[in-house]
Image: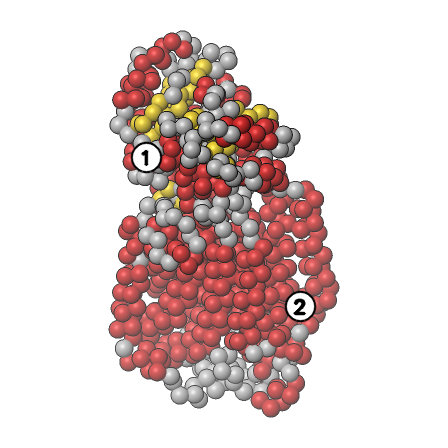
């Protein structure tokens, strides 16, 4: 099937190219015209924080409006001559800054959210918007920020806090840097502009297609706001890699003397099949995210699955068409004539595979394979060590760059009102027929809870059926004591307050929400890991018919994933190289990142296993002895696997240029994991298979009597079918 599809696209190359370009442009245009409706709320059905929000939505309709804070600070005091008037001017400017502003609550209106520090130097006024916090237009938020922070000076300092004022993820620079790096690596590795340009063109087509699909998807289901960035990152990486593997195999077949139609069939039947299995493994891994039971994660998973599926389609249809168009530049006639049929190009499969003397590493593999396996595995385990210290949580404004207004507002609030001022909790009471007076002892009980700094007066809903109390912890959101306080309130203080009454109490707020997300991820992670590992192992076993090969691939990929997690701990929790990478203040790893990284890296790491093992199995099927098959497969694949890993790592690492902390974690985690996965498959896998020899492969994997160097071009041409994996 793959061969027939590739040949059809190769023959109708211009039609295929035009069709893909029109489809990509149409999808991107449709997505742009439809607009986006990304989700920033991250609902968590069934959790305490979500129940709190549900009660607020029913009984406090005004709570649906988004709010932000204006933080004012004056060393001389806000009541100093001239300062108070200028502070009033700031509030007046905020009211008229944009129609999306409904009202501004003055800082001296404590009953409605205004706040003034005890020393009178810092105050917060509340901006109430006409829409929810996730629906405030970026243009309006940027205009309000520009106008109000521009009024700082002459002793008055003005900053803004709130999610609408936080920096938004941007991938434009990362995409450009990633593609430029891929082009440079391809030119350096293969010395051909055609070989460099073909994968990049495929990646650009995939980029447009994926962007259109994700934008349209956001209209059909809840898709988190960072999904586009993650999908773009994945598509750029895998599109270049998949196109490269097929193109290298095609060029190798052409240099062996095969005609273009035969060469594209060989590439589709071997590397194309490997690409299909590799892409399927990525999709299977991403599908495991549905086991997590978190709705916004479903949108992220579907976004990435659509991107990878589109990339697979490109690799199996557009790439054969591009190979036909670029054939004269990929394999110049003069070079073919000089080499002749059957000549071997270094790093590509062909006749004469055993004519070259083995290198130092190949000699080491044959003499000390077990030592290589043990040594490399020990190194991987050592690099995984920081994983033991991983702490999950969520970044807040304190982790933003120091140049950001939300970071400066965060620091001013903590200095004036204590660390917990940036991590308030909302205790919501669903009265269920009880009188608001029945909660009289709630405030006093909350004040006695360990870790509570301040408890505000209860606010009763207009219909008298619910109350909300603001609780300020002594510690900030990223302190381990704050989650303990949330658990203490839920498990002890609130059940005691509700005992003997129909009332129910729930803890909400951003801090409680992210704690619920962390707990949900931790509860479901084991199921997710088991599902991904088992399904991926079965896919590999089906492809290679060898349990040993399947298990070693899974174990090495898990070790690579552990190294990636260790890198995130070292950089983002411990602060290693934070100045160079611009990661801001240290803090926990995002709670959903380990799950997402596993889904992505497990599939991507398996890619390299599939490509190397496919080459080894091809040699095995042609009759080579087990050790010779490993040596040939390694020689045939190592250069292209190394180039592909460097390209993918460069693309991922370029996303660390984003000012957004989440994108930095995704970029660095994926880049590190991909490089380690490639190194493991080029070092540990060949050593292990060399050590095991025939024990690694089923007896039916070898066909004695078939020359190890492969069929002659004439025989292959007559048969009309490529050597299959």
Q: Is residue 503 left or right of residue 350?
A: left
Q: Position of residue 624 (x, y in %)?
A: 41, 79
Question: Vertical placement of 355 versus 466: above or below?
Answer: below
> Where is residue 552, by image quadrant?
bottom left
Task: Calculate the distance from the C-alpha at mark 1 to the C-alpha at mark 2.
Answer: 60 Å
- Tag 2 secondary structure: helix
Q: Which residue is mark 1?
A: 475
Q: Is residue 190 left or right of residue 437?
A: right
Question: Vertical placement of 58 versus 298: above or below?
Answer: above
What sort of colour scheme is used for the picture?
secondary structure
Q: Position of residue 310 (x, y in %)?
A: 59, 55
Q: Earlier in the sequence, mark 1 or mark 2?
A: 2
Q: Which residue is mark 2?
A: 321
> Where is residue 372, by image quadrant?
bottom left
At 37% from the left and 42% from the top, the residue drawn is 393
Query: Dot 1: within a 10 Å radius of its alpha carbon, few (fewer than 14), some, or many (20 or more) residues?
Result: many
Question: Vertical placement of 265 versus 405: above or below?
Answer: below
Q: Residue furthest front?
A: 81
Q: Is residue 691 left or right of residue 54?
A: left
């Amino acid at each position: 099937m793959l061969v027939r599809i590739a040949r059809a696209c190769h023959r109708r190359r211009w039609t295929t190219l035009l069709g893909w370009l029109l489809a990509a442009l149409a999808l991107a245009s449709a997505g742009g015209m439809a607009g986006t409706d990304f989700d920033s709320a991250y609902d968590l059905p069934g959790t305490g924080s979500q129940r709190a929000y549900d009660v607020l939505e029913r009984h406090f309709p005004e709570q649906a409006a988004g709010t932000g804070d204006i933080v004012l600070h004056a060393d001389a005091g806000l009541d100093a001559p001239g300062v108070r008037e200028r502070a009033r001017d700031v509030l007046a400017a905020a009211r008229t800054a944009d129609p999306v502003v409904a009202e501004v609550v003055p800082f001296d209106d404590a009953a409605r959210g205004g706040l003034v520090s005890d020393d009178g130097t810092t105050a917060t006024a509340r901006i109430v918007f006409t829409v929810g916090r996730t629906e405030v237009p970026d243009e309006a938020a940027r205009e309000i920020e520009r106008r109000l922070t521009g009024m700082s000076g002459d002793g008055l300092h003005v900053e803004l806090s709130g999610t609408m004022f936080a920096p938004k993820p941007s991938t434009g620079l990362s995409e450009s840097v990633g593609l430029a790096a891929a082009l440079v690596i391809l030119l350096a590795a293969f010395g051909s502009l055609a070989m460099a340009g073909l994968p990049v063109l495929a990646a650009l087509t995939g980029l447009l297609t994926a962007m259109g699909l994700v934008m349209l998807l956001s209209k059909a289901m809840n898709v988190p706001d960072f999904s586009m960035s993650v999908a773009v990152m994945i598509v750029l990486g895998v599109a270049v890699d998949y196109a490269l593997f097929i193109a290298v195999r095609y060029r190798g077949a052409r240099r062996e003397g095969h005609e273009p139609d035969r060469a594209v069939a060989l590439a589709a039947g071997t590397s194309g099949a490997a690409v299909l299995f590799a892409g399927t493994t990525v999709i299977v891994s991403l599908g495991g995210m549905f086991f997590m039971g978190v709705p916004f994660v479903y949108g992220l998973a579907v976004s990435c699955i659509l991107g990878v599926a589109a990339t697979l389609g490109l690799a199996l249809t557009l790439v054969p068409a591009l190979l036909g168009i670029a054939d004269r530049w990929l394999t110049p006639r003069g070079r073919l004539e000089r080499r002749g049929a059957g000549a071997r190009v270094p790093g590509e499969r062909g006749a004469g595979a055993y004519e070259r003397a083995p290198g130092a590493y190949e000699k080491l593999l044959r003499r000390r394979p077990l030592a290589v396996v043990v040594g490399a595995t020990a190194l991987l385990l050592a690099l995984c060590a920081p994983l033991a210290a991983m702490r999950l949580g969520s970044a807040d404004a304190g982790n933003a760059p120091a140049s950001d207004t939300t970071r400066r507002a965060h620091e001013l609030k903590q200095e004036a009102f204590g660390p917990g001022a940036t991590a308030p909790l909302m205790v919501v009471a669903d009265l269920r027929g009880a009188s608001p007076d029945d909660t009289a002892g709630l405030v006093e009980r909350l004040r006695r809870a360990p870790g509570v700094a301040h408890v505000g007066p209860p606010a009763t809903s207009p219909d008298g059926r619910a109350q909300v109390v603001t609780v300020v912890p002594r510690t900030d959101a990223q302190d381990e004591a704050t989650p303990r306080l949330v658990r203490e309130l839920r498990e002890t203080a609130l059940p005691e307050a509700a005992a003997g009454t129909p009332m129910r109490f729930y803890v909400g707020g951003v801090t409680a929400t992210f704690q619920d997300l962390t707990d949900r991820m931790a509860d479901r992670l084991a199921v997710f890991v088991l599902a991904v590992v088992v399904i991926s192992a079965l896919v590999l076993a089906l492809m290679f018919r060898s349990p040993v090969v399947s298990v070693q691939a899974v174990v090495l990929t898990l070790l690579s994933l552990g190294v990636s997690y260790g890198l995130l701990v070292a950089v983002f929790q411990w602060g290693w190289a934070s100045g160079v990478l611009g990661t801001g203040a240290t803090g926990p790893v995002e709670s959903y990142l380990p799950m997402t990284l596993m889904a992505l890296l497990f599939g991507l790491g398996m890619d390299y296993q599939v490509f190397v093992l496919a080459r080894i199995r091809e040699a095995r099927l042609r009759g080579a002895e087990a050790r010779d098959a490993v040596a040939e497969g390694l020689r045939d694949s190592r250069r292209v696997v190394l180039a592909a890993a460097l390209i993918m790592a460069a693309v991922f690492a370029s996303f660390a240029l984003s000012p957004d902390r989440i994108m930095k974690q995704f970029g660095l985690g994926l880049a590190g994991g991909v490089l380690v996965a490639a190194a493991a498959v080029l070092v540990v896998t060949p050593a292990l298979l060399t050590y095991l020899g025939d024990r690694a492969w089923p007896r039916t994997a070898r066909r004695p009597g078939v020359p190890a160097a492969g069929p002659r071009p004439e025989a292959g041409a007559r048969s009309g079918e490529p050597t299959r994996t």
